[in-house]
């Protein structure tokens, strides 16, 4: 699935992923390829993007997550990225 992560300051991530875990306002959500259409407000916590054994971790606050047609869009109010880690 294709994942795009943006903030008001910059594009943070734009690429393929095998899984996304995000802090929704009412708990953690996990997104896998071919997920049903979905939209949620984001709270605060860790956003994790996994692809072929590589993990990218970010800390975010606020925003929303949308899943449509095997595409995940994360629009974060504030985000800090640790970038890629194995």
Image (cartoon, helix red, strand yellow):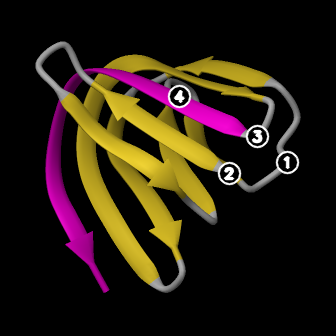
As displayed, is residue 15 above or below residue 86? above
The one nearer the camera, 10 or 58, is 10
Image position, residue 67 (x, y; %)? 70, 29
Asked if the residue at tag 1 contacts the one at tag 4, i.e. Cβ–Cβ closer than 8 Å, the answer is: no
Q: Are marks 1 and 3 in contact (CB under 8 Å)?
A: yes
The Cα atoms of the two marked residues, 2 and 3, are separated by 5 Å
Whether residue 31 sits left or right of residue 58 in the image: it is right
Cβ atoms at labels 2 and 1 below 8 Å apart: yes
- Which of the 4 image quadrants contains residue 27? top right
Residue name at image x 23 percent, y 45 percent: 59
Residue situated in front as seen by the camera: 4 or 50: 4
Q: Residue at x 68, y 51 (%)?
A: 1
From the viewer's perspective, tell me whether residue 70 is left or right of residue 55.
right
Q: Which numbered disc flags the more N-terminal residue, 1 or 3? A: 1
Contact? badges 2 and 3 (CB < 8 Å): yes
Where is residue 56? Give x, y as percent.
32, 64
Q: CA distance from mark 4 to mark 1?
A: 14 Å
* Mark 2 secondary-structure assignment: loop
Q: Residues within 10 Å of mark 4 (few under 14, many from 20)?
A: some
Specify the segment rendered in magenta.
71-86
Magenta stretch, overall SS = strand
Mark toward the start of the polypeptide (2 vs 3): 2
Which of these two is toward me, 42 or 68?
A: 68
Task: Work out whether mark 4 precedes mark 2 in sequence or the reverse, and give the earlier one.
Answer: 2
Residue 25 inside the magenta-drawn segment: no
Q: Secondary structure at mark 1?
A: loop
Q: Quadrant of residue 36?
A: top right
Q: Tell me, for residue 70, which label it has, or none.
A: 3
52, above or below 78, in the image: below
Q: Which mark is residue 34?
A: 1
Residue drawn at the location 38% of the way across and 34% of the way down:
5
Where is residue 11? Give x, y as percent. Answer: 24, 30
């Amino acid at each position: 699935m294709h994942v795009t992560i943006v903030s008001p300051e910059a594009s943070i991530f734009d690429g393929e992923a095998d899984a996304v875990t995000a802090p929704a306002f009412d708990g953690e959500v996990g997104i896998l390829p071919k997920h049903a259409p979905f939209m949620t407000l984001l709270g605060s916590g860790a956003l994790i993007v996994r692809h072929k054994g590589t993990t990218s971790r970010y800390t975010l606050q606020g925003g929303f997550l949308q899943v449509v047609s095997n595409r995940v869009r994360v629009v974060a109010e504030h985000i800090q990225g640790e970038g890629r880690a194995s």
